Image: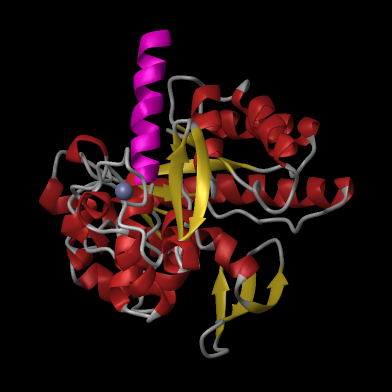
Amino acid sequence: MPVGTAATVKAVAQDVLEGIGAEGLGAQIILANTYHLYLRPGHELIARLGGVHDFMSWTRPMLTDSGGFQVFSLSKLRKITDDGVEFRSHLDGSKHFFSPEHSIDVQIALGADIAMVFDECVEHPASYERTRASMGLTHAWAARSKEHFEKHKQRVPWFERVGAGETQRLFGIVQGGMYADLRRESAERLVEIDFPGYAIGGLAVGEPREVTREMIARTLELLPKDKPRYVMGVGYPDEIEEYAKMGVDMMDCVLPTRAGRHGLVFAREGGAIVRMNIKRKEYAEDQGPIDAACSCMVCQRYSRAYLRHLFTTGEALSATLNSIHNLAFYLDTMSRVRGELATTN
Ligand SMILES: [Zn+2]
């Protein structure tokens, strides 16, 4: 899932997103961040305009996170109680309060197809006791999120228009830090509460990759195979390939677009994935594409020399073209993995 933080996948227009990647299938689902949209332009404004799909003219599926991750990573002066989190906006210092109920209200107003329960994101590293206490809070908040969602889900801006009683789906989030037994306990508790899909949160926060892999593996064992299983905030192309093959169905990451804006593009060289820094002098007169095997519109048309020029002169098109290639590279990776899984299973 490409990340469209503020209802835009940065530097890439919606019609381009719809056609990007293998066989021109495009991005089938994108993510938007509740925290950012709540602060600007405001969830009530977006609800008045019909919800986030109408607002940004995107008819395919969308997912919103709960806002929790940004509250814990971006905002200032957080005060956490059992009830929720008080924080100050990273934009203007204004004071706000997010509880599970409020996060759900905001996400219902935004109206993405998939909403997430509000959870506490524990810092890394965190002690066993601290992680265990935080996980307990996350479980209580998951139950409250679900209860509130069930009570108010018909308020979604498109409820009448779509009809047939169709509503959003609310996914649970497994926490438990880097402790396998806590991950187990968390997965069991969430399955008990019962959600139509499950996320594994709190990973890729600076731990070694083998720990990430182990936590995912231990958690997947306990999550129902017939429901979507989503690892939040990963990763490099080789990581998403590995996790998909372990049984992960959904992932989101800012990396393809963020790296693209910084002039980092992904390519395949002799079976290995390489990260190219497009600003390097060696590309100044290189007439080849980023990746000769890539069928994206950027590789079909533009040379490394031109992309280097756009980046070094700070042209706006640089971010757009680099992001399009990287998104295509990610979507192509997943398309190839799906093909491989289809033939092995
Ligand atoms: Zn390409």
Q: Residue at x 39, y 33 (%)?
A: 334
Q: Quadrant of the C terminus?
A: top left
Residue 345 visible within the image: no
Q: Nearer the viewer, residue 103 or 23?
A: 23
Whether 332 is among the magenta residues is yes
Q: Position of residue 113 (x, y in %)?
A: 30, 47
Asked whether residue 212 appears in the rendered view, the answer is yes
- Magenta residue span: 329-345
From the viewer's side, name the closer residue of 212 and 49.
Answer: 212
Left or right: 276 as drawn, with respect to 200: left
Decide: is 282 above or below 145.
Answer: below
In the displayed structure, would residue 180 be above or below residue 53? above
> Which residue, as the protein is rendered here, is positioned at the far front?
285
Q: Main secondary structure of the magenta part?
A: helix
Displayed quadrant of residue 342: top left
Q: Quadrant of residue 77?
A: bottom right
**Towards the viewer: 312 or 13:** 312
Q: How is the image coloured?
A: secondary structure
**Location of residue 281 with respect to 90 vertically, above or below:** above
The x, y position of residue 171, in whole percent, is 46, 41
Q: Quadrant of residue 58?
A: bottom left
* Residue occupying the point 44% across, 72% down: 36
Q: Position of residue 187 (x, y in %)?
A: 64, 31
Which residue is located at x 22 percent, y 63 percent?
A: 13
The residue sitting at 81% across, 54% down in the picture is 125
Q: Is residue 111 magenta?
A: no
Image vertical order of residue 148 relative to residue 217, above or below: below
